[in-house]
Amino acid sequence: MRIDIVTLLPELLESPFRHSIMKRAQEKGRLEVVVHDLRPFGLGKHNQLDDYAFGGGAGMVMMIEPIANCLEALKAERDYDEIIYLSPDGQVFHQAMANRLSLHQNLILLCGHYKGVDERVREQFITMEISIGDYVLSGGELAAAVVVDAIGRLIPGVLNDESSALLDSFQDNLLAPPVYTRPADFRGWKVPEVLLSGNFPQIEEWRLEQSIVRTRQRRPDLLDGEQDVD
């Protein structure tokens, strides 16, 4: 899988993909993350990327021409399944969306800044808009890193134990059950006996029950089917 990220600030994305699971995913050849600096596509001797909004108002707007030139250059090299704009008014990102996106081959993530991008970018190039939550960030880079991490770990061969991703929170709209490790007794705080029993059908039944209880307590909206899984 290849993910191209278009950004004004490529240095913000230097660390997230150089460590841990994302680093291993790239070393294994399962995931390719390419960060593109939008600045060389800017206009004039100063490589201008933003301008004042028509009609007035505070804040600058990312211009359409540099973005169009960058996206068209990328599209000339390969076909993309989705061109995604990271935006606070996009569809809120969730596990089902990550699952679906992980099945694609090529994605572009466009990181917004300032007051956003010229609306014509969204009308003419963007196929999907994603928000990672109901709040505003300084730019789309952190959101892009979140989306890539959530997608990348689902790609077959990335995790050492591929079944691990299937047991994560939000798979099947349930939160993950409690987990424990050694020692079995620490200061009198004991691991549930069922987990030490070796009775794996009983353990799986306990885990499912705990997932339902935890979800009902902490995220009842998931049990009510309020999450959009499109």
Image: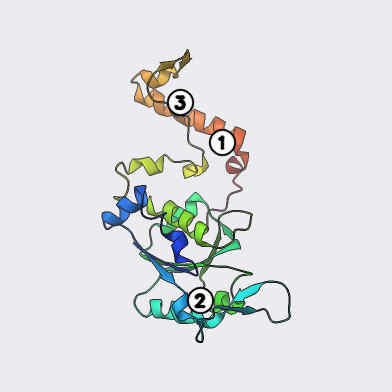
Q: Quadrant of the N terminus?
A: bottom left
The residue that mark 2 highlights is: 125
The residue that mark 3 highlights is: 206
Q: Nearer the viewer, residue 152 or 143?
A: 143
Disc number for residue 31: none
Q: Report the side of 60 relative to 103 (left or right).
A: right
Given the image, on which type of amino acid does mark 3 rest? Trp
Q: Residues within 10 Å of mark 2 (few under 14, many from 20)?
A: some
Q: Where residue 16 sits in the image (x, y, percent)? A: 42, 54
Q: Is residue 155 visible?
A: no
Q: CA distance from mark 2 to mark 1?
A: 38 Å
Q: CA distance from mark 1 to mark 3?
A: 14 Å
Q: Report the side of 103 relative to 63 (left or right).
A: left
Q: Report the side of 228 relative to 186 (left or right).
A: right
Number of residue marks: 3
Q: Residues within 10 Å of mark 3 (few under 14, many from 20)?
A: some
Given the image, on which type of amino acid does mark 2 rest? Phe
Given the image, on which type of amino acid does mark 1 rest? Thr
- Where on the picture, by quarter, is residue 31? bottom left
The residue that mark 1 highlights is: 215
Q: Earlier in the sequence, mark 1 or mark 3?
A: 3
- Which mark is in front, 2 or 3? 2
Q: Earlier in the sequence, mark 2 or mark 3?
A: 2
Q: CA distance from mark 2 to mark 3?
A: 48 Å
Q: Residue at x 44, y 52 (%)?
A: 150
Contact, mark 2 vs mark 1 (Cβ under 8 Å)? no
Does residue 146 lie above or below 106 as drawn? above
